[in-house]
């Protein structure tokens, strides 16, 4: 599955990328703000994007998610503070930082299942909040 | 007759207007200070009739001023035979209640008669607003002060935690026998120590979000030389412009990149030379910060560039440079290596 990482801390993004690639995911790009995220999505057509809610230059992850959705990219948020309420169908769910390797992989597996409309998706791992 | 048609006004017309004016008007004698005329606004606010007021003096209405004090206040007017006086005090009504006033007092001359004329404004409302503003100002200052204390405390805790993490890695490195593993753990420790040092600076300077770049670069060079145990072989040349501040969000990535570049210089440049010099230049203009790291060593050998240790270092340099939008250029040869980093200031 092609994944876009939208995260402004370069080393954290690198670390997530390493875990994903080790587990067979294809990380198409790491983008650190809204403009580069949208550009990368247009160029690579990822199936899913892992989006940090606070981005470089004051950009908002919510705004990026809205636009990625419009482009047909499913979104999972990653953040220190998962929003309590579901944000209007913007994302499949939210992963609570700091993330362990297992959490990221388990979380993305669940997200992928939901994205494909699976009738029996696995339960979310601890630290993941699903928006139904 | 309509007012406009009878200009100039007669004294009696003026008198009627003054009588009805909203300001409180008081006229009293210069000899015994008893009130001669007091307008309706004053009478109604005070609750006294004109007859009652004719038996009163200004200090009778002002609980804050005694007769002696009032006479002292107006003495300059009497002595210079002119002028006016503005002051704030409190009036007491017939029923004993108080209201704040602003007094504008004049000594007027009419032929050889002199008279005191006071226009007085009830400033109770004004003063209530002023007090509310002052209170609000004090509340805000207290909030600001406690925020400062909180930030300082947070910086302290972060600094401590990072030092603990650094220590854990150091201990782990000591436990390990295998050289490769030891070296890897120490590399990790050294990188984290750079982050810890930035937070230590923040805390020490009582600054909550800014660090002086020259100060931390100087410390970084010393610490890096020390950590590689080459203090006797290497001399450092520093040419650092002071007064350049960066927020933590850019100071940390910049410090990590410079640390990587320095470490590369020190690890590889002098593997065959006995002694050498490593240098760091820092300057900035309005648009960008420029850091130049150079050495007079042998130049980075190609083999080292592709080893896995350098692999991570290079990845870190590239990723963090991109994060701070910095460009890197490198010159390497027999005379040494020079890397220049330019970071735009937005």
Image (cartoon, coloured by chain):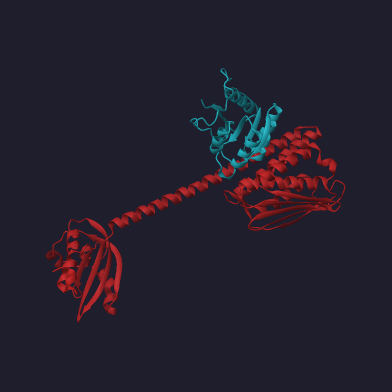
Residue A14 percent coordinates (x, y): 68, 36
Q: Is residue B143 left or right of residue B222?
A: left
Query: What number of labels is visible?
Result: 0
The residue shown at (16%, 74%) is B11
From the viewer's side, name the closer residue of B71 and B6.
B6
Question: Which chain has been coloured cyan in this picture?
Answer: A
Residue placed furthest toward the left: B51
> Is the residue A17 above or below the residue B115 in the image?
above
Q: Is residue B293 left or right of residue B111?
A: right
Residue B233 percent coordinates (x, y): 83, 50
The residue shown at (68%, 47%) is B255
Corner quadrant of residue B249: top right
Corner quadrant of residue B33: bottom left
From the viewer's side, name the closer residue of B67 and A33.
A33
Question: Which chain has been coloured red in this picture?
Answer: B
From the viewer's side, name the closer residue of B227 and B216.
B216
Q: Is residue A113 left or right of residue B306?
A: left
Of the 4 image quadrants, the one containing the N terminus of chain A is: top right
- Mark yes or no: residue B36 visible: no
The residue shown at (29%, 55%) is B125
Corner quadrant of residue B98: bottom left
> Is the residue B156 above or below the residue A123 in the image?
below
Residue placed furthest toward the top: A120
- Mark yes or no: residue B142 visible: yes
């Amino acid at each position: 599955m092609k994944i876009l990482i939208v995260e402004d801390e370069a080393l954290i993004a690198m670390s997530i990328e390493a875990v994903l690639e080790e587990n067979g995911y294809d990380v198409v790009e790491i983008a650190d703000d809204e403009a580069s995220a949208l550009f990368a999505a247009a160029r690579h057509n990822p199936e899913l994007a892992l989006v940090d809610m606070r981005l470089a230059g004051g950009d908002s992850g919510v705004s990026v998610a809205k636009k990625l959705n419009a482009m047909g990219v499913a979104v999972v948020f990653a953040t220190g503070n998962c929003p309590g309420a579901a944000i209007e169908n913007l994302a499949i769910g939210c992963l609570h930082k700091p993330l362990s390797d297992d959490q990221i992989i388990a979380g993305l597996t669940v997200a992928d299942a939901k994205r494909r409309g699976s009738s029996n998706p696995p339960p979310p791992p601890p630290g993941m909040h699903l928006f139904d | 007759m309509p007012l406009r048609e009878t200009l100039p006004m007669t004294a009696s017309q003026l008198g009627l207007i003054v009588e009805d004016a909203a300001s409180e008007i008081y006229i009293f004698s210069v000899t015994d200070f008893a009130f001669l005329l007091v307008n309706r606004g004053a009478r109604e606010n005070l609750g006294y009739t004109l007859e009652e007021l004719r038996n009163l003096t200004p200090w009778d209405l002002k609980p804050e001023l005694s007769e002696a004090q009032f006479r002292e206040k107006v003495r300059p007017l009497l002595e210079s035979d002119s002028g006016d006086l503005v002051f704030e005090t409190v009036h007491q009504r017939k029923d004993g209640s108080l209201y704040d006033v602003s007094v504008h007092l004049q000594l007027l001359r009419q032929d050889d008669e002199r008279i005191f004329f006071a226009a007085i404004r009830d400033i109770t409302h004004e003063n209530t607003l002023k007090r509310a503003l002052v209170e609000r100002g004090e509340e805000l200052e207290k909030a600001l002060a406690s925020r400062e204390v909180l930030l300082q405390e947070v910086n302290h805790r972060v600094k401590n935690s990072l030092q603990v993490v650094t220590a854990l890695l150091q201990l782990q490195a000591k436990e390990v026998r295998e050289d490769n593993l030891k070296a890897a753990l120490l590399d990790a420790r050294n990188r984290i120590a750079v982050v810890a040092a930035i937070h230590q600076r923040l805390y020490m300077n009582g600054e909550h979000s800014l660090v002086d770049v020259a100060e931390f670069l100087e410390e970084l060079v010393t610490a890096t030389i020390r950590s590689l145990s080459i203090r006797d072989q290497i001399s450092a040349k520093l040419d650092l412009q002071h007064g350049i501040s960066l927020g933590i969000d850019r100071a940390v990535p910049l410090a990590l990149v410079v640390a990587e570049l320095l470490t590369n210089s020190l690890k590889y440049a002098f593997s065959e030379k006995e002694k050498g010099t490593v240098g760091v230049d820092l300057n900035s203009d309005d648009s960008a910060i420029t850091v130049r790291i150079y050495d007079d060593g042998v130049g980075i050998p190609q083999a080292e560039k592709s080893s896995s240790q350098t692999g991570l270092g290079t990845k870190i340099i590239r990723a963090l440079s991109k994060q701070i939008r910095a460009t890197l250029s490198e010159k390497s040869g027999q005379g040494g290596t020079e890397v220049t980093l330019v970071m735009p200031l937005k």
